[in-house]
Image (cartoon, rainbow, N blue to C red):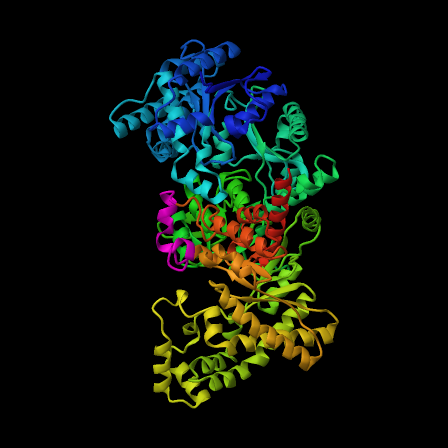
Amino acid sequence: MAKWVYAFGGGSAEGEKGDKNLLGGKGANLAEMARLGLPVPPGFTLTTEVCTAFYRNNREYPAELESQVEAALADLEKKVGKRFGDPENPLLVSVRSGARASMPGMMDTVLNLGLNDETAEGLAELSGDRRFALDSYRRFITMYSDVVLGVSHSTFEEILERFKEDRDYTLDTEIAAAEWEEIIAEYKAAVRKALGEPFPTDPRDQLWGAIGAVFSSWMNDRAITYRRMYDIPESWGTAVNVQAMVFGNMGETSATGVAFTRDPSTGEKGYYGEFLINAQGEDVVAGIRTPQCLTKVMREKMGDPQPSMEEAMPQVYAQLIDVFDRLERHYRDMQDIEFTVERGTLWMLQTRAGKRTARAALKIAVDMVADGLIGEEEAVLRVEPSALDQLLHPTIDESYERDVIAKGLPASPGAAAGKVVFDADEAEHMAKLGEKVILVRVETSPEDIHGMHAAQAIVTARGGMTSHAAVVARGMGRPCVSGAGEIKIDVAARTFTARGRKVHEGDMITVDGATGEVLAGEAKMIKPELTGDFASLMVWADRARRMKVRTNAETPLDVQTAKEFGAEGIGLCRTEHMFFDADRIAAVREMILAEDQSGRIKALSKILPMQRDDFAEIFRIMEDRPCTIRLLDPPLHEFLPHTDEDVKAVAEATGLPAAGLMERAKSLAETNPMLGHRGCRLGITYPEIYEMQARAIFEAQAIVEKETGFKPVAEVMIPLVAVAKELEILKVRIEAIARKVEKETGTAPVYLIGTMIELPRAALRAADIAAHAEFFSFGTNDLTQTTFGLSRDDAGKFLGDYLEAQIFEKDPFVSLDQEGVGDLIKIAVERGRGARENLKLGICGEHGGDPASIRFCEEAGLDYVSCSPYRVPIARLAAAQAALKKSA
């Protein structure tokens, strides 16, 4: 019989050590803490396989599950000496999700489960604190109704806020036991009104309701969005953890908190976290009450007048610090820990690898190497490549005069400017229109995940350093200021006020997540310096990787930026981008609209020196690094004049009548130009274009070699080849130009001639093409388009539907389609190298900066990847991780 349920607690645990695939991250770590002898409330885990079976069988549980849960519940009752549903000695449990990858706040949780009128009285008698028992009961009704029954949390918040206002209360802790009875009665009435039936009182019904809700939450909108953002497969499923309740809301000797063994924003050594006295865990995370600092140092730094846990509960704090050290040494990573203190007794509720900023990830990895906890290769594997993007963008210039309009907690570092928006849907909508936005909320909830992802930064009026906004923002790499209490938001008016100033939706502000400041207007930014821990990790990554990393660039600024980021050459220089400059577009149009070859050659002679200067500047920057230069690729219509002014300018340059030019333009128009007269087809029809470009390349090499002593390496790429004969014809012409330039300059150009593989036929006939090509560069943008028959410019109109329906697991223009397009690449690699053993292979589409696609390139045996300048460090790290994982 299959085993669906695994128990933990009392110093032991069932299942294999660290089996996150089966037990989920939370369940595996609870089991591991139990084995280590740490104070973990006992419980049991329903495995991720239950979740998989649940969805595979039309939301039906496996036949044996109920009996196994009953057996585990009976075992739990023995361990704690209480009985589930017993009015005199009630066992209460929490029911929590636990996927194998951390998904903070994305799925559902129910606390205090097992309470009804009778067990609440029993809890009051056992604890000697009736107020505590009723506080726990009202919390359970609120949470269970929201998560399981679908009665909104706001329904109960409105009842509670109205009750407090009527009595002039500020905090929930001011409410007495008799008053909680009144509130509970109102809560029950609200449930009956909403559902037409009473709140469920049978604890076993409650338990199965909560289990079902947690499994169902695996497929809620926010969880789906989060999985898509972080590449978490739907097939993994979530586990469900049922655990005996311990209570942080049993008076002034009880507390609850969230802590990290290092600072998750900076990576600095030192305990970091927050806690609340007389509270439950949801109070800390939800930002309902402003929490207190964990340590005295942190309290003094934040200027918080409330005592820290170190000062308020010194004995428990000392136990907690010992647990922190044990867990970090055991897991050899920074830990994110949840704990509860019940009447002076410490209980550990969770540990996991803590979400952290990229800067913190780098520092923690490098420091742990220095401390001997991990090796260099493991440090390389610890940092998420895409997270480096956080470090590669500007911060606020120190010389900028700040106009501070509000200040809160520095919850997630970095700086960003954007227009103010007040809800997640509007943030997503405006971002899709190309606007940069800052999401400003009283507090965020998991339902805001899409808007947080769309925003440049997040600001909340409530919540602490471990609130939902702070944790999620750090994981996303978004700057965040939380707990900015001086911000008063008027959602109806779409404004907020702070320090006597009113800010409207659409106004520009700047967020500095490192200082906690919100500034008026758009601040001046500066580029980051990538030294220190970043440089150390990059050195280790470069030692580990096999593939080279190049850049897609053609402007001197982009080429220089990429070189500073460690690019080892240019993988794609798109020469057509050079044609659009205002001082040369007229000559380009003159060339296109010329009626014969002599007219084209005359116009090309004007373009030649411009192209030569462009290439020379690139070669100067790249020195002896290889530079792949793609000859003219797009259809000619892209360069044609469209306005009367453009036509007039070309007419003056060519001496041709405007009417004649318009007729010529119409004759060049195509129905489907992206599959028309472009790429090598232009070179076949108008060979003088490619000959001019080749001459510009080879002459630039000669100039730079004489100037600098470096021998620039050019890789001349002929695009859109489908038939070997196309390449053969054009290669002969280019080689002839190289010989002429050598004769004229006395300098032999160093070059290769190859092609971009961007058509399925080219991949399939790679052996034929390799007879003439010295390199292949996979143009996966067009190869994806031509394989799927999709236009990447237009597919955005329906790709969202395809992702929603899971027809596509990922956008194929963002992450390589490894089954289809990937198979074509593998075929081309095998057949190309079969024909030419030393064939150089690379990838230059946008996928060259995507870590998952880079892993595929390593497996396929490519020599290099090429990506945009700001993604070069990401590609270097991803290539290193791919090599390490392949060799493991």
The magenta region covers 786-807
Q: Nearer the viewer, residue 620 or 191?
A: 620
Where is residue 344 shown, x and y percent of the image? Answer: 59, 20
Identity of the residue drawn at 67% across and 63% down:
625
Where is residue 271 shown, x and y percent of the image? Answer: 65, 35
Identity of the residue drawn at 40% across and 85% down:
648
Res. 264 visible in picture: yes
Against 162, residue 834 (above or below) is: below
- The quadrant holding residue 293 is top right
Question: Which residue appears farthest toward the left when viewing the image?
Answer: 196
Where is residue 721 shown, x and y percent of the image? Answer: 49, 64
- Residue 125 sits inside the magenta stretch: no
Question: Which residue appears farthest toward the bottom when viewing the image?
Answer: 655
- Residue 797 sits inside the magenta stretch: yes
Against 748, residue 360 (above or below) is: above
Q: Say left or right for 107 vs 60.
A: right
Where is residue 646 shown, x and y percent of the image? Answer: 41, 81
Res. 253 visible in picture: no
Q: Nearer the viewer, residue 842 or 23?
A: 842
Q: Say left or right for 735 vs 581.
A: right
Which quadrant is home to the N terminus? Answer: top left
Which quadrant is home to the C terminus? Answer: top right
